[in-house]
Image: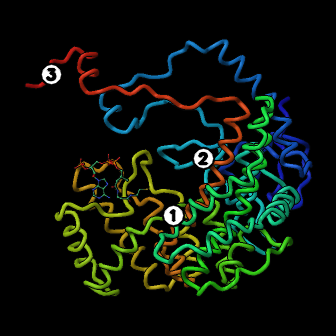
């Protein structure tokens, strides 16, 4: 007889066998890898690497010559969209469901990743654990990562001095990038590489550098914020009892616990752009907040007829509402349902998709992550739009760095897709050059 599926409730105190395959009560999730009890992230990753290396080796031996797709001329002119050309272990973009982190969609991650005590949003540290290991971490494992990050968060004096000496007209993102480059002084990998360590150990240095960088990015970002928008006031001290996002919001100078929750959600899922907010600001200026549907439609058609796009709508790959839009909308419905800007964004959600569909050429008329961008931050008082891209940088670091560690672990080479000139391509497909 078939064994009944094991069931459990998703809570913080579960103790499960290592890597047990199970069926949680959360209906949408049919697969759950839970980590071992080991709270040492590096050791957990180290144990997985030889297994994965072996898997890739034997897969390539068997299927190295297997074809996985065809490339058309349009794909080459279209930014390589739809071309299967890279291996990434940590996340995959699904056209219907949006991004999946190690197979888990955003709503699934929100359900199963550990939360801060009393909180409702996932801790980004847990996402990082998931990205690196493929396992949903326990509360204790996430707490261990939070502690490790807090302990590594200090900046070397030369970076602090550099940030404090930048002129205030230097864009926050330029400051952010410059600080990351200057943190090279702390790189374990750079040092080990120059000493000629074995290739098979590269990932270990990469792991340390990644964790150090993730730990230091909020400190860098908060220093920039204070210097530019808070008269250079001090970011204060790092609290090793606080999680990564809580330390970040405290350093930024925000003490609303709901803003910290927002930051946890944002750092887990997010990216920002400011075009949408600028467009909304223009809209509010022209027609006010209590805009009728008719006027709103008119404004949208005006945007389109002037040859502009409706910002925050459409996607190159995704074909549904971006789940990152949806979870921000849910956050807003929960915490700021009466906010004017949110209400406007919600109204636009009902009006834009039919208009874009009517245009006939837009492949995805649904909102992307940017359509909600900034609304929540503005509500909590973070109104400095040119800073949002720095938050994006802090958030994206989790994904990039987790992927980089696995690149090193699997010894993947530099990507070198073959590019061709139009002439070469015409020759290849036997097309005569246009006169
Ligand atoms: C995201 C985006 C760049 C994807 O582009 P894409 O892959 O070329 O999208 P499509 O294949 O659906 O585009 C087909 C046509 O519809 C148009 N279109 C797509 N989204 C549109 C929008 N939101 N408003 C108006 N027109 C749009 C494209 O400009 C293109 O027109 P063209 O053939 O005259 O050049 C595009 O949807 C866009 O510009 N959106 C608004 C800006 C935005 O939100 N960017 C952030 C993305 S995360």
- The x, y position of residue 257, in whole percent, is 71, 81
Instruction: Work out whether 345 lies above or below 431.
Output: below
Question: In the rendered structure, which disc, 1 or 3, sits on the residue that comes first in sequence?
Answer: 1
The disc label shown at residue 392, or none = none
Task: Say whether marks 1 and 3 touch (CB < 8 Å).
Answer: no
Per the image, the residue denoted by label 2 is 100
Instruction: Work out whether 109 lies above or below 69.
Output: below
Viewer-closest of 341 and 255:
255
Question: In the rendered structure, which disc, 2 or 1, sits on the residue that comes first in sequence?
Answer: 2
Which residue is depicted at the point 40% across and 35% down?
80
Mark 2 or mark 3, whichever is nearer to me: 3
**Circle 3 crowding by C-alpha within 10 Å: few under 14, some 14–19, many from 20:** few
Per the image, the residue denoted by label 3 is 433
Task: Say whether marks 2 and 3 touch (CB < 8 Å).
Answer: no
Instruction: Work out whether 126 lies above or below 20.
Output: below
Q: Name the secondary structure under disc 1.
A: helix
- The x, y position of residue 394, in whole percent, is 62, 62
Which color scheme does this rendered protein use? Answer: rainbow
- The x, y position of residue 98, in whole percent, is 52, 49
Q: Is mark 3 within 8 Å of ligand 1?
A: no
Q: Name the secondary structure under disc 2.
A: strand
Question: Marks 2 and 3, how far apart in space?
Answer: 43 Å
Question: Marks 2 and 1, how far apart in space?
Answer: 30 Å
Viewer-closest of 289 and 281:
281
Question: Marks 1 and 3, how far apart in space?
Answer: 43 Å
Figure quadrant of the C terminus: top left
Which residue is depicted at the point 59% across and 80% down?
227
Per the image, the residue denoted by label 1 is 174
From this viewpoint, which residue is outermost toward the left? Answer: 435
* Residue 32 appears in the figure: no
Q: Name the secondary structure under disc 3.
A: loop
Which residue is depicted at the point 64% across and 58% down?
182
């Amino acid at each position: 007889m078939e064994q009944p599926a094991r069931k459990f409730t998703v809570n913080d105190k579960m103790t499960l066998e290592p890597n047990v395959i199970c069926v949680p009560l959360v209906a949408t999730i049919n697969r759950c890898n839970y980590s071992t009890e080991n709270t040492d992230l590096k050791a957990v990753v180290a144990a997985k690497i030889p297994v994965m290396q072996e898997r890739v080796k034997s897969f390539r031996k068997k299927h190295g010559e297997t074809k996985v797709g065809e490339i058309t001329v349009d794909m080459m002119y279209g930014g390589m969209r739809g071309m299967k050309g890279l291996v990434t272990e940590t996340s995959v973009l699904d056209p219907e469901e949006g991004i999946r982190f190690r197979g888990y969609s955003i709503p699934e991650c929100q359900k199963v990743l550990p939360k801060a005590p009393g909180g409702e949003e996932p801790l980004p540290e847990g996402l990082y654990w998931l990205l690196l290991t493929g396992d949903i971490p326990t509360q204790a494992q996430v707490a261990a990562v939070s502690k490790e990050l807090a302990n590594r968060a200090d900046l070397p004096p030369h970076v602090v001095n550099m940030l404090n000496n930048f002129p205030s007209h230097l864009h926050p993102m330029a400051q952010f990038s410059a600080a990351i480059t200057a943190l090279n002084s702390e790189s374990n990998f750079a040092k080990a590489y120059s000493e000629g360590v074995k290739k098979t150990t590269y990932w270990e240095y990469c792991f340390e550098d990644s964790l150090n960088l993730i730990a230091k990015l909020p400190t860098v970002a908060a220093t920039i914020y204070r210097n530019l928008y808070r008269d250079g006031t001090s970011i204060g001290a790092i609290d090793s009892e606080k999680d990564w996002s809580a330390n970040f919001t405290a350093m930024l100078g925000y003490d609303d616990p709901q803003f910290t929750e927002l930051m946890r959600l944002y750092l887990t899922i997010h990216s920002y752009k400011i075009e949408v907010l600028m467009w909304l600001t223009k809209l509010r200026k022209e027609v006010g907040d209590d805009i009728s549907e008719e006027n709103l439609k008119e404004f949208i058609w005006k945007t389109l007829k002037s040859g502009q796009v409706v910002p925050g709508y459409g996607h190159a790959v995704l074909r549904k509402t971006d789940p990152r839009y949806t979870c921000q909308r849910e956050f807003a419905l929960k915490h700021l349902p009466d906010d004017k800007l949110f209400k406007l964004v919600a109204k636009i959600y009902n009006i834009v998709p039919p208009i874009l569909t009517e245009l006939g050429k837009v492949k995805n008329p649904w909102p992307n992550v940017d359509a909600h961008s900034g609304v929540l931050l503005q509500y909590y008082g973070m109104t400095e739009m040119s800073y949002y891209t720095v938050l994006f940088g802090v958030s994206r670091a989790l994904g990039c760095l987790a992927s980089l560690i696995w690149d090193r672990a699997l010894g993947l080479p530099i990507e070198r897709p073959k590019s061709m000139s139009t002439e070469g391509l015409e020759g290849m497909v036997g097309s005569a050059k246009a006169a």
